[in-house]
Amino acid sequence: MSFVWRKRWFVLLFPLFLAITFWHIKVETDLNAFFTATDDEDSRLLAGLLKSGELSRRYLLVVEKSDHVSAADTINGAENPMSVAAFSARLLSQLAKLDDVEQVWPADQPPRDWVDAVASYAPYHARLFSLNPEQDAPELFDPSQLPAKAAGLKQALLSPQGSFVKAIAKQDPLLLSLNGFKALQGQFQQQAKRSQGGALILQSRPAALDAEAQTRLQAAIQANFAALNAAAGEGFKLSMAGVPVFSVAAQSEISQDVTLVSVVSSLAVALVFLFLFHSFSALHWVMMVQGASFVIGTLATALVFPQVHSLTLALGASLIGISSDYPIHVMVHCAKHRNTPLAAAKLLWPSLLMGGLTTVIGYGALGFTGFPGFEQIAVFALASVVGSLGLTRWVLPALLVNSSLHAAHLPGIGAWVDFCGRHRKILLGLFAASVVMAVLCLPQIRWMSDMQQLAVNMDNLKQQDAAVRAHFSSIEPGRFVLIQADDWETALQRSEAAERRLQSLKQAGVISEYHGLFPWLVSKQLQTENSQVYQHGLTPEFQQAWQTGLAQAGLSVEKLGTLALASPAALQPSVVMDSPVRHILSGQIVSGQTGVMLSLWLGEHDPDKLIAGLAGLDGTRYFSQKDQLDQLAGKYRDRSLVMLGIGIGIMALFIWLQQRDLRKVCLTLLPSLAGVLFIFATWALMGEEVSFLHVIGLLLSVSLCVDYGIFFIDNRGQDADVTYHAIASSTLTTIASFGAMGLGKTPTLPILALSVSLGVSLGFLLCPLLIQKPKN
Amino acid sequence: MTIKRTLFLLLALMPVLGWADDAVLSELLTRIRQTGQAQFQYEETRVLELADAPWHGQGVMLSGADGSLVKLQLQPARVIMAIAVQRMLYWDPQQNQRHSAALDSAGPAGEQIKVFRSILQGRTEELQLNYAIAADKQGPQWTLRLTPKPELSSDDLPSIELSGDDQDQQRRILITQPDGESTEYRMHKATAAQQQDYSLPSLLREASGE
C-alpha cells in the first residue's frame, strides 16, 4: 500500500476507533475492584463486603453543640438553649424529605419498620421464644410468675407502646415473641445512653460508590444542617461518617490523580520529544501514533473486561512514554544517519520486535501477580505495545515522509560511553564489589505487611470516622464471625450454635456485645425444639394460673386467656427474606457464590480468646477484614516475586531464541538485573517497607531495560553512539511519563514511579559498563 | 307552597347559620389557645380493648410556655410522660421503664401525645391540619368536636371531644381511638397552693433521667 493510502487509512480509522472506544467503554471508579482479588471465596467475600449491601449506603451523623457555644453557655448561662436532641429531631425531619434519602432514623431507637417487623413474629411466638428453650423453660413457664406477668402486660398496654403491645398480645398473650428481641432493645437503650439524642443514621438511595449522587447528597445534608443551624444561632456542629464519605473522598483523589498523571505525562513526553527532535510536525504525528496506541489498548481492555478501571487508564497513560520508545529509536537513527524513516524502521525492526516482546512479557507477568487491576493493565499494555509496534513499522514512515528531523545531541552520553570503555576494569571491579555488598544487604529487606498503607491517605477522615463512631454502638466494622453452609437450615443451626458460644464469651468478658441473627432467623430444628418445650409447659395448671393472673390485673380473660398451640408451620427463611426484615439483616447475610454465608457482628473483643471460644464449631470462623487484606498483600508479594523470576526467564528464552548465544543473553539482561539488585539493596539499607507494588515496578523496569540491552548489543545502525543516543532518548521519555505518576496521591502511583524510574535509570547507566561498546 | 317557603327560608338563612357556627368556633378556639404556664389536676379513665374494666388514674398536668408538657400520673403508680421540645419521654419508676424518642418517630404514642398537647395548649393550627372541627355552645357549656379529615383516615387518628364551661375552671377531653379504645380526662385548674408542689423543669429532668 502506498504511503498516501496508509496515511489516509490512519487518519480515517483513528477517529473511528476513538468513537467506538467512547461508545463501548464503561469506566469503573471503585477502588476495591482494582485492589481486591476475587480469585478465592474469601477474597470475593471481602470484595463484596467492601462495595455492596445496605450497610455501605448508610451515613452516621452526629450533631453536637459547637465548641464556642458550649463555652459561651457555660459562661453566660444562656437561657433555655435548644437541646441537641431537639435540634437533631428537626434535622431528621428535614433530611427525611430529601429525594436521595431512603430512610433516616435516630440511632437510639429502631426505625418504624423494624418495630412493625418485630410485631410480625407474634404468630410464631411458640417457635422462637428462646435460643436455649430447655434452659429458659423453668423461668418462662413458672406458674407463680404469671400474676406479675399479667400486671406487666397491663402496664405495657397503658404505656406509650400500648398499641404495639396490644397487636402482639392478641396473638401472643405471654409476649413470648418479644423474649428473643430483648437483646435488640438493650442495644438501643445502650445507644441512647451513648448518643444523648444527637446520633442519626441515614440510609441513602444511591449506591455508596455512586460518587456523583453521594456528593450531591452530602451537599444537601450540609445545606439542610447549615440552614437549621443558622436559625439556631450557629450553636451546633455536624460530623459525618460511613462508607459513602470515604468513597466520595477517594473518588475525588483518584479523579485528580488520573487527570494530573495523564496531563503531566503527556506534556512531559511532548516536551522531551520537542527537545530531542525540534520538530512540531514529527511531534504531531508521533503523538497521533501514541494516541492511537492508547485507544487500541483501551478498546482491547474494554472488550476483554466488562468495565475499565480509571486507574488502568491512569497507569496506561504512562505507557505513552513506553510506546513512544519505538518511534524514537526509528527517528534518532533516521536523523543521525540521514536515512528515510522507512529504511530506519526496516533496519531496526528485529530489535524493535524483540524489545516490544520483552515489554509485553513484563506486563503479561504483571497480569499473573493476582492483583486484579493489573490484569487489565496487562491486556492494555499488550494491545497498545503491539499497536505501537505495528504503527511504527508500517504507518509512521508514511506519516513522517514530509517531516524534517534534527536529533539533538545529548551532552555527556558519548563521554559516559568512553569513560566506561577507558576505565572498564576498575569500574567492573567496583561493580563486582557492589554486587557482593548488595547481595549481603538483601536479607535486611523489610516487607510491607499492612495493605492499608497502599490505600489513599485519609487520616483526617479516619479520625473523623473514629470520632463519629464513638457515638454509636461499639460493633466493629471489619471483624465478625462468619458462618458458611450449603443450605439455610445448616447455616442457621451453625449460627445458633455460635451465638450460644458468644453468649458464654460475653458473660466471660471476652466480648462486649454481638449482633446475632436470632430470633430474626431461626432454624427449623430450634423452632421444633421451642414448640415442644412450649407444648410441654402449657399444662392446664399453667393455663389456669394465667387466667387467674389476668383477672387479678383486670385484663380480659376472654381475649387473652387462651394460650394457643404452636403454629403448625415453621417460619421459613425464604419468607423472612422476602419481608422487610431483609433490610434489617442487610450486612449479615453475605452473598457468596455457593451456599449461605451469615455474619455475626462483634463488639470489642479479644481475637485470640474469641477464636479459641469458637473452636470446634463446623463452618464457623473468625473473619478479620484487615487480616484478610494483609494476607492478600503477602500473597501478592510472593506472586509478584515469582512473576519477576518467571518474567525474566521468559525474556531470556526469547532473547536466546533470537541470538542463540548464552553470553549475549546474559549481557542483555545484566544491566537491568543489576539495577534491580542495587535498588533492592538500597531499600534494604534505607529501611523502606517493600510491597508487591515495588516488586511489580521493578518487573516493569526490567522489561523496559532489557530493550536497552537488546538495542545496544544489536547496534543495527552500526553506530554505538547513535544507538546509545536513541536509548538515552527513550529513557528520558520513560522517566518523563513514569515520573509524572510520582505526583499522584494514591500511594500506588508514586511507588511505581520510583521503582520504574530508578530501574530504567540504573539500567541505562550500566549498559555501556557491562556491555562492551559494539564495534561500528 | 309551605314546603317551598320553608326550603326558601332554610336556603336563605343557611349562610347566616354558618357565620354563627364560625363565630362560636372562633371564640372557642381562642378560649382554648393557651399561652404561658398552666397546671391542671386530672382524672383519667381509659377503656382498653383487652381490659375487663375501665382503668382509672389521676395526677397533675403541667404545660410550659415553650411547648413542653408533663403528665405526672400519681395514682395508681407514679409515671411521667412528657414532651420536651421535640422529644417524648416516659419514665415508670416502678417497672424501671424509661423511653426517650424523637416525637416525629415515636409512632402512634408520639402522635397521640402531640394531639393532646395541641388540645391542651390550644395549638389550633396544628389541629386544623388533620381535623375537621365543629363547635357547639349551650349556655355556659361549650363543646368542640374534632373529627379526622376523611382524606387522612388511613392515619388512624383518634376522634376528640373537648368540652368545658365559661369559667374555664374545668375541662373534659375524650379521645376515642378508631379501634374503640378511649381515654377520658377530667381536668380542673390547680390552685395557686397546689401549683407550688411540682416544678415542670425538675419533672422533665426526672423523666429524662438526668
Image (tube, coloured by chain):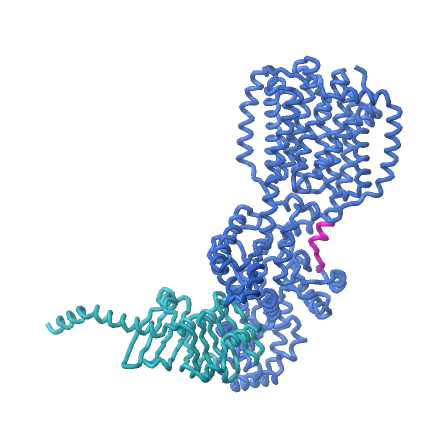
Chain colours: A blue, B cyan
Magenta stretch: includes residue A176: no
Q: Is residue A710 placed above or below A244 in the rendered structure?
A: above
Front residue of this view, candidates A242 and A70: A70
Is residue A376 something that shows in the picture? yes
Count of numbered circles on the image: 0
Q: Residue at x 54, y 79 (%)?
A: A153
Which picture quadrant has residue B6?
A: bottom left
Front residue of this view, candidates A23 and A273: A273
Expressed as whole percent of the image width and height from the top left, the position of residue A475 reads 65, 61
Quarter of the image with the N terminus of chain A in it: top right
Q: Is residue A543 placed above or below A606 in the rendered structure?
A: below
Please give left or right for residue A38 compared with residue B34 in the image.
right
Expressed as whole percent of the image width and height from the top left, the position of residue B19 reads 24, 69
Q: Is residue B7 placed above or below A709 in the rendered structure?
A: below
Magenta stretch: includes residue A629: yes
Q: Residue at x 76, y 15 (%)?
A: A718
Is residue A519 something that shows in the picture? no
Please give left or right for residue B53 compared with residue A188 in the image.
left
Please give left or right for residue A715 compared with residue A291 in the image.
right
